[in-house]
Amino acid sequence: MKCLINVLSGLKRKCIPHFVFSSSATVYGNPKTNLIYENFPIGRPFSPYGNTKKMNISLANKIRARFQDTFETEPLMIFSPGRINIIGEHTDYNDGFVFPAAVNKGIIAAFGKRDSNDSMAYAVDKNEKVKFSLNSLKPLAKGSWKNYVIGVVAELKKRNKGISNFNIAFGGDIPGGAGISSSAALENSVVFGLNELFDIKLSRQEMILISQKAEHNYVGVKCGIMDQYASMHGIENHALLLDCRTVKSKPFKINFKEHTLILINTNVKHRLSDSAYNDRRSVCETIAGLLNVKALRDASEFDLEAIKNKVTSENYQKALYVIQENNRVIEASKALETGNLELLGKLIYASHEGLRHQYKVSCEELDFLVDQTKLNPQILGARMMGGGFGGCTINLIARTEIESFKTFISKVYKKKFNTNCSIYNVSLSNGTKIIE
Ligand code: GLA
């Protein structure tokens, strides 16, 4: 019966679908086939995003139990995924294209109302708790997980959204700094949970903008929209070709048949990555200004050539990288449409070269991992993923090769850096959602 109600309420909501409108038919194909969900209403218990297969059930049970023990009530449970990105790095804040997907790893958060003068957040993995008053919110020490939670609350308050005191307990199964965006997963879980708890009626699209602002204003990273979007709007077995200007995406079903994607975590995160990120963004904005365009998305290599003598050669290379990477994303979407995995792999390798030599956001450990894959013809492409300076590489590899490559890479990485790398298989999952 519950199942029937879910189906009916789902059909009711599906009466107001939202279609992608595209000015670029070559990229997006026939708009009628491109159902997307950006402004889909949120409702309980049905989620148009369905069930996420292979989510970490034991983590969910642990978080629920910790919440119950600590706050002595039944929580509202939320799963919010991390993301991978097939290609399109550092293009999002240039209004460009990216190709991310939500994964079955992320953050699980438990929420409940709190009858008190303050609110409490409990990071289960760290065994740390913080109490805060909704009336005097301010950023805490840089680098603290607390800023992700409090930042979202502050952004909701700024928009006069009626929230009162609450408890949250959360934990995750993606390590911070891995480049899989545990931060967006946490922000999205908080905004989604509070939206539900206090019936604020925000759309998913409004929620991701709140998450992004929390990161800008409380965490201090002037991030683009890719991570929050992918985590919120992910669709099982699909990657999303996202236009970061319109903030609309086209889902691509991902089935690489004999190949698959695996992640390899360097397990390092170098210092200064946040300030380097903000620096890169400001270089791009300055060059867009010189070119008299809104963002580098609007510039061609030809345009850039015309102002070459007005910028340093380092900054010229950075802008060139962005323009070329944007083109690579479009090329990659076509390669996926035609099933040309060899080409996709080449584009992925080219992306890494650009990130390494032009945009300069890679590091020795990431470069080593990518270089090692080039020795193996069964790996079609590999590159660093996310902001850079550590975290994961993403690798397009023949399924039959996975086990032997894992053994090989673990050994050589350990030998070279005297530390272990970690290897993750992920499946592409649905976006942020309520779980039972
Ligand atoms: C981080 C940011 C994203 C994006 C990537 C690089 O993950 O949060 O907005 O800029 O880096 O592509």
Image (cartoon, rainbow, N blue to C red):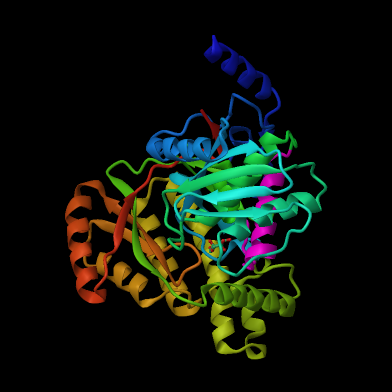
Question: Residue placed farthest to the right in the image?
Answer: 160
Vertical position of residue 416 compared to residue 89: above or below: below
Instruction: State the image quarter where residue 305 is shown.
Output: bottom right
Is residue 57 toward the left or the right of residue 186 in the image? left
Can you see residue 140? yes
Q: Nearer the viewer, residue 216 or 429?
A: 216
Point out residue 93 in the picture as x, y percentages from the top left corner: 63, 64
Whether residue 192 appears in magenta in the rendering, the answer is no
Is residue 239 toward the left or the right of residue 396 in the image? right
Vertical position of residue 424 compared to residue 20: above or below: below
Q: Residue at left 45%, top 48%? A: 172
Q: Nearer the viewer, residue 411 or 285?
A: 411
Whether residue 220 appears in magenta in the rendering, the answer is yes
Q: Residue at left 67%, top 48%? A: 119
Bounds of the magenta segment: 202-225
Vertical position of residue 351 compared to residue 256: above or below: below
Instruction: State the image quarter where residue 43 is shown.
Output: top right
What is the number of callouts on the image? 0
Rendered-image quarter of ligand 1: bottom right
Quarter holding the N terminus is: top right
Point out residue 311 in the picture as x, y percentages from the top left corner: 64, 87
Q: Residue at left 47%, top 58%? A: 87
Q: Residue at left 55%, top 48%? A: 230
Question: Of helix, strand and loop, which mostly describes the magenta segment?
Answer: helix
Can you see residue 27? no
Point out residue 15 in the picture as x, y percentages from the top left corner: 69, 22
Point out residue 120 in the picture as x, y percentages from the top left corner: 63, 48
Q: Nearer the viewer, residue 355 or 51?
A: 51
